Image (spheres, rainbow, N blue to C red):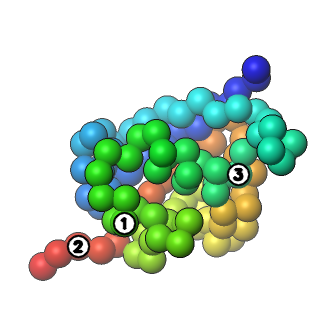
Amino acid sequence: MTTISVKVEFSGGLELLFSNQRTHTVELPAIISETSKGPDLQYLIEYLRDNLLKERVELFVENNTVRPGILVLVNDTDWELEGEGEYVLKNNDEIVFISTLHGG
């Protein structure tokens, strides 16, 4: 099976939910059998939730997408400009999740 490699980074406190590890390299299938397409950001979010998230799912995911207050960057560009969850990932993409929610 062919795979793609995606660099994922968490900051703003989100790294605490992912084993206190800020950067992860994720290998994903190049083609998703259910859709016959490449993995998109929605697939990555579900993969992270199911495989890397260690606690408090509700602080990362809400209604099957990232919860409000989490900024998502695709290769340093706001994901809203890239189609949000529908953006099809490419080999060596860099995806950054930044929490803008802080206690105080």
Towards the viewer: 22 or 63: 63
- The residue located at (55%, 66%) in the rendering is 65
Q: Nearer the viewer, mark 2 or mark 3?
A: 3
Could you tell which of marks 2 and 3 lies nearer the N-terminus? 3
Dot 1 corresponds to which residue?
A: 58
Could you tell which of marks 3 and 1 lies nearer the N-terminus? 3
Quarter of the figure that contains the C terminus: bottom left
Dot 3 corresponds to which residue?
A: 40
Crowd tier of the residue under label 1, counting other residues whose Cα lies within 10 Å: few below 14, some 14–19, many 20 or above:
few
Return the x and y of residue 24 as percentages of the image width and height. 43, 36
Between the residue at mark 2 and the residue at mark 3, the CA separation in whole angstroms equals 28 Å
Q: Which mark is residue 103?
A: none
Return the x and y of residue 14 as percentages of the image width and height. 32, 56
The amino acid beneath tag 3 is Asp
Q: Judging from the image, what secondary structure is the residue with disc 3 in?
A: loop
Q: Give the quadrant of residue 20.
A: top left
Q: Is residue 40 above or below residue 99?
A: above
Towards the viewer: 48 or 80: 48
The amino acid beneath tag 1 is Glu
Q: Which mark is residue 102?
A: 2
Q: Is residue 103 left or right of residue 94?
A: left
Q: Is residue 66 above or below residue 54?
A: below
The amino acid beneath tag 2 is His
Q: Judging from the image, what secondary structure is the residue with disc 2 in?
A: loop
